[in-house]
C-alpha cells in the first residue's frame, strides 16, 4: 500500500498534469478502493474519473466464508460512502476472486445472490476444478438476475486460460452484453470480441500500455472496450484511465474516445 509520501507524490503529479488539462469525464471500470487513501480517490475524481467499479478482493486466502461476507458488507456500505466523500460514484462489485476461494465459499455466493448489483471480480487464475466450479456458480447467478459481471483473466498462461474462461462463459448462457472479460491483451482481445463480449483494457505495468490500447482500438474500433486501472493494493498509478483517454483524444475523434472512456461502462453497468 502506498506510503504517505507516495500519496503526496501522486497528488502533486495529479495537480501538475491534470488540473488544467480539460480531461473528459471517465469511468474506471475496475479498481480496489480499499487499497487507496482518500487523497488518491480525490485525485481520481478531480482528474475526471467520476465513476468507478470497486471489485471485491481479499489479499490473502480467507480462512472462513464469513470473512468474505464481511468484506462484501464493507465494500457495499463503507466504501460507497468513502467514494462519495471523495467525489466518486463508487459502484461495488462483489464475488469470490479465484485467488480468494476458501472452504464454504457457497455461503459467500448466497450473500452475492441476495445483494449484488454487479458481480466481480470473478474468473480463473490457474483454471483448477474448484475455480471452474466457482466461476460457473457466479455466472449462473448473473444470468438468473440479469447482472453484469467482471471476469478476471490471469497474467500467466493468459491465452490458454482466457480460452477456457470464454468456454465457461459461453456455456452459462449469459447475455454477452453483461460480460466484461478483463485484463485483455493484444493476444487475447480478438478471441474475446469474436464471442461478442466486452474486453477490459487494464492500463498498468505488466498488463497493457497506453500505446497498446491505441493500437487495439485502431484495429478493432471503440464499441466493445472499457478502460480500467486495477489500482488498489499496489503503488500503481490511480490515473491511468485519464492518461489513456487523453492520449486517445490526441489521435481519434472525441466522440469515439468517449465510448471507451465512459459510455460503454455506463451501458454495461446500467448507469
Image (cartoon, grey):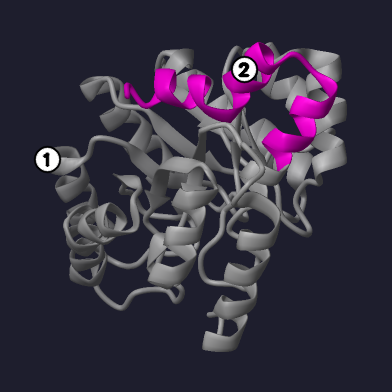
63 in the magenta segment: no
Residue 194 placed where, x, y %?
70, 12
Q: Left or right: where does residue 30 sit relative to residue 56?
A: right
How far apart, in angstroms, are the residues tagged by discs 1 and 2?
A: 29 Å
> Residue sitting at 50 percent across and 59 percent down?
43
Q: What label does residue 224 carry, if any?
A: 2
Instruction: List the single residue furthest toward the left.
Output: 114
Helix, strand or loop under label 1: helix
Residue 118 drawn above or below residue 99: above
Q: Left or right: where does residue 83 sit relative to residue 116?
A: right
Read off the magenta span: 244-271
Question: Is residue 131 something one can see in this rendering?
Answer: no
Residue 223 drawn above or below residue 114: above
Residue 237 placed where, x, y %?
65, 62
Question: In the picture, residue 220 is in which quadrant?
Answer: top right
> Residue sitting at 75 percent across and 45 percent down?
158
Instruction: Decide which of 72, 11 is in the foreground and name it.
Output: 11
Quarter of the figure that contains the C terminus: top left
Question: In the picture, residue 215 is in which quadrant?
Answer: top right
Marked residue nearer the N-terminal end (1 or 2):
1
- Main SS category, magenta section: helix
- Dot 1 corresponds to which residue? 114
Instruction: Decide which of 200, 125 is in the foreground and name it.
Output: 200
Amino acid at each position: 500500500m502506498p506510503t504517505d509520501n507516495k500519496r503526496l507524490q501522486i497528488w502533486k503529479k495529479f495537480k501538475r498534469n491534470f488540473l488544467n488539462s480539460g480531461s473528459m469525464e471517465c469511468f474506471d471500470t475496475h479498481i480496489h478502493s480499499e487499497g487507496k487513501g482518500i487523497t488518491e480517490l480525490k485525485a481520481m475524481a478531480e482528474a475526471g474519473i467520476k465513476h468507478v467499479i470497486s471489485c471485491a478482493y481479499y489479499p490473502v486466502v480467507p480462512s472462513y466464508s464469513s470473512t468474505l461476507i464481511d468484506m462484501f458488507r464493507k465494500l457495499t456500505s463503507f466504501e460507497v460512502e468513502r467514494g462519495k466523500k471523495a467525489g466518486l460514484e463508487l459502484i461495488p462489485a462483489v464475488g469470490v476472486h479465484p485467488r480468494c476461494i476458501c472452504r464454504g465459499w457457497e455461503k459467500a455466493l448466497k450473500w452475492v445472490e441476495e445483494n449484488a448489483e454487479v458481480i466481480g471480480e470473478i474468473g480463473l487464475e490457474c483454471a483448477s476444478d474448484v475455480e471452474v466450479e466457482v466461476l460457473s456458480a457466479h455466472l449462473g447467478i448473473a444470468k438468473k438476475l440479469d447482472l453484469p459481471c467482471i471476469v478476471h483473466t490471469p497474467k500467466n498462461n493468459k491465452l490458454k486460460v482466457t480460452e477456457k474462461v470464454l468456454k465457461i462463459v459461453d456455456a452459462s448462457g449469459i447475455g454477452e452484453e453483461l460480460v466484461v472479460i478483463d485484463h485483455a491483451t493484444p493476444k487475447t482481445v480478438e478471441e474475446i470480441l469474436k464471442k461478442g463480449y466486452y474486453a477490459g483494457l487494464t492500463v498498468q505495468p505488466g498488463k497493457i500500455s497506453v500505446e497498446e490500447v491505441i493500437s487495439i482500438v485502431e484495429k478493432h474500433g471503440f464499441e466493445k472496450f472499457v478502460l480500467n486501472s486495477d489500482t488498489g493494493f499496489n503503488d500503481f498509478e490511480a490515473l491511468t484511465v485519464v492518461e489513456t483517454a487523453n492520449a486517445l483524444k490526441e489521435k481519434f475523434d472525441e466522440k469515439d474516445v468517449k465510448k471507451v472512456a465512459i459510455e460503454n461502462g455506463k451501458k454495461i453497468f446500467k448507469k
